[in-house]
Image (cartoon, rainbow, N blue to C red):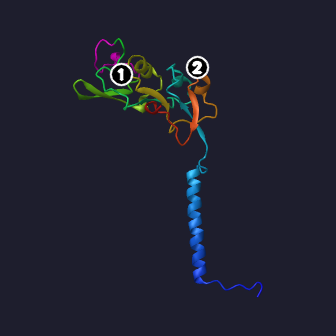
């Protein structure tokens, strides 16, 4: 009787398929939870804690306008009447006239909420990444404006030109799965 096997039955086949399917599901869950499926790819990002708003993001980027854009941390913003990221510190009047605004391209807009509050927002297509609004907000306001690399625009150059020229070494490599360093979460 050595080597004699019983013929496969439908019950044996179904049992084997059920065990194999369960094993595959468990293996897929372990694989997904372990993170092995991730590409491990790194992308460039600007660390807002290190940024000194030097203006090189606007001029050094290989893209024109730059892939670096102003980001507004709404959770940090005070919705002030006097936003130093919007107005020049020496503005003669607090209105929307161009001579009173710090942004040279008019990328920051304000919308009246209720007296005396306004909501400020950034129109990214107009932003060149010059950092003037960020610098003013950091020096005179609460720092709710900061610069970030927009990955839908960035070419993710192997050696980022901005990173090479950044005097504060504020450009760092971060995992592609979490590409933004948001100031309100730091």
Q: Nearer the viewer, residue 25 or 61?
A: 25
Name the image quarter holding the N terminus. bottom right
Residue under circle 1?
A: 86
Describe the element under mark 2 as helix, strand or loop.
loop
User: Residue 106 placed where, x, y %?
Assistant: 37, 24
Number of numbered labels in the structure image: 2
In this view, which residue lies farthest toward the front?
A: 1
Counting residues from the start of the chain, the first of labels 1 and 2 encountered is: 1
Q: Is residue 99 magenta?
A: yes
- Residue 82 figure quarter: top left
- Residue 105 figure quarter: top left
Q: Nearer the viewer, residue 30 or 115?
A: 30
User: Residue 128 placed where, x, y %?
Assistant: 46, 26
Q: Identify which residue is drawn at 60% across, 78% down.
A: 13
Judge from the rendering whether residue 150 lies leftward or rightward of residue 31; answer left or right: left
The answer for how far apart the CA atoms under marks 1 and 2 are is 26 Å
Q: Nearer the viewer, residue 166 or 3?
A: 3
User: Residue 97 placed where, x, y %?
Assistant: 31, 19
Our reading of the magenta stretch's main secondary structure is loop
- Mark 1 or 2: the one toward you: 2
- Answer few, some or many: residues within 10 Å of disc 2's Cα (few below 14, many 20 plus, some between 14 and 19): some
User: Residue 25 placed where, x, y %?
Assistant: 56, 63
Residue under circle 2?
A: 167
| Residues rendered magenta in the picture | 91-104
Q: Nearer the viewer, residue 164 or 46?
A: 46
């Amino acid at each position: 009787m050595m080597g004699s096997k019983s013929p496969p039955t439908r019950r044996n086949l179904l049992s084997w398929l059920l065990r194999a399917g369960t094993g595959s599901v468990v293996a897929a869950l372990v694989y997904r939870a372990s993170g092995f499926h991730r590409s491990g790819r790194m992308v460039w990002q600007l660390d807002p804690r290190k940024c000194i708003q030097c203006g090189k993001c606007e001029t050094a980027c290989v893209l024109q306008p730059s892939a670096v854009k102003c980001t507004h941390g709404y959770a940090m913003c005070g919705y002030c009447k006097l936003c130093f990221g919007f107005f020049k510190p020496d503005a003669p009047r607090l209105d929307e006239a161009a001579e009173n605004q710090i942004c040279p391209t008019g990328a920051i807009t304000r919308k009246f909420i209720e007296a005396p509050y306004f909501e400020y927002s950034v129109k990214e297509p107009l932003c060149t990444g010059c950092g003037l609004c960020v610098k003013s907000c950091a020096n005179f306001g609460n720092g709710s404006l900061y610069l970030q690399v927009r990955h839908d625009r960035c070419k993710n150059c192997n050696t980022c030109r901005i990173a090479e020229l950044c005097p504060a070494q504020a450009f760092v490599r971060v995992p592609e799965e979490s590409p933004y360093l948001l100031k309100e979460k730091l």
